[in-house]
């Protein structure tokens, strides 16, 4: 059974704190993604990576950075959290090439107070 | 600029009837489309997909229709069941970019 695992289900952080969200996949996928989901806005792409140490900005990268040191692991870093980063964060992985589905983790609900 | 649009934020359907969820896109380079289902506090799960070389794909109770000239796709669920109550997201990609562009979602409620 394929799996994408996110390190935390729920997090509460204070404004200005640094946050690491970790994601691990066991499918040997080259491509990994971080999205955030907000009501009325759907899923918006923050960053993605198509190989180890490679990264590309998505649609809303401001305030975020990422790290991909190993193929199976993709981390999202919030250097200094703000209340507008309160959201559901979703990690996904996908095999490269055409006509494949992306597999998602269970999500991390981050609340910044 | 929203390249994938789901203009109905919510839909309510009686159990046993057909649910039709709609999705429009603006990027003519999109050639692969997917539907995902999402329950609260869980990650999205893949439901069904369609390539631009087809106009219909069916999997059990779920059928996706693609109208390329109108840049429109729809998901039909027949018959609808209470367990289908969830948020449904439409997604698209260009086949080479690997990143999926999602719509804003439609919340489906199937009532008894």
Image (tube, grey):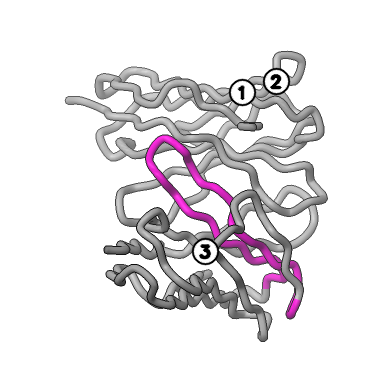
- Mark 3 touching mark 2, by CB under 8 A? no
Query: Alpha-carbon distance for marks 3 and 2?
Result: 28 Å
Where does label 3 land, which residue?
Answer: A91
Identify which residue, B97 or B2, lies in the foreground.
B2
Residues marked 2 and 1, same chain: yes
Query: Among all residues in the image, which is located at the extreme left?
Result: B112
Vertical side of A108 occupied by A53: above or below: below
Q: Earlier in the sequence, mark 2 or mark 1?
A: 1
Where does label 2 land, which residue?
Answer: B71
Where does label 1 land, which residue?
Answer: B24
Q: Which residues are magenta?
A: A29-53
Local crowd at mark 2 within 10 Å, few (<14), some, or many (≥20)?
some
Q: Say which chain tag 1 marks.
A: B
For mark 2, give the secondary structure: loop
Vertical side of B88 occupied by A19: above or below: below
Q: x and y percent of residue A12 in the render?
A: 27, 69
- Mark 2 touching mark 1, by CB under 8 A? yes
Q: Say which chain tag 3 marks.
A: A
Taking the image as shown, residue A113 lies to the left or right of residue A96, namely left
Taking the image as shown, residue B85 lies to the left or right of residue B3, namely left
At x 54%, y 35%, the residue is B103
Vertical side of A75 occupied by A89: above or below: above
At x 82%, y 50%, the residue is B96
Q: Is residue A104 magenta?
A: no
At x 66%, y 39%, the residue is B92
Identify which residue, A47 or B96, lies in the foreground.
A47
């Amino acid at each position: 059974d394929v799996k994408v695992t996110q390190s935390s289900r729920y997090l509460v952080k204070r404004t200005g704190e640094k946050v690491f969200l970790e994601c691990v996949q066991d499918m040997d996928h080259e491509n990994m993604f971080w999205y955030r989901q907000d009501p009325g806005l759907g899923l918006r792409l923050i960053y993605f990576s198509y190989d180890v140490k490679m990264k590309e900005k998505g649609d809303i990268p401001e305030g975020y950075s990422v790290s991909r040191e190993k193929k199976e692991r993709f981390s999202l870093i919030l250097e200094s959290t703000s209340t507008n980063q309160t959201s559901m964060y979703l990690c996904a992985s996908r095999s490269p090439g055409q006509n494949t589905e992306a597999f998602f983790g269970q999500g991390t609900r981050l609340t910044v107070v | 600029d929203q390249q994938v649009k789901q203009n109905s934020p919510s839909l309510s359907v009686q159990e046993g009837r057909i649910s039709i969820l709609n999705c429009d896109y603006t990027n003519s380079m999109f050639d692969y489309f997917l539907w995902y289902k999402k329950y609260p506090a869980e990650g999205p799960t893949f439901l069904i997909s369609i390539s631009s070389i087809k106009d219909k794909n069916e999997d059990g109770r779920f059928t996706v229709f693609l109208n390329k000239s109108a840049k429109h796709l729809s998901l039909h669920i027949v018959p609808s069941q209470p367990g289908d109550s969830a948020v449904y997201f439409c997604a698209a990609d260009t086949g080479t970019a690997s990143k999926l562009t999602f719509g804003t979602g439609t919340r489906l409620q199937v009532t008894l």
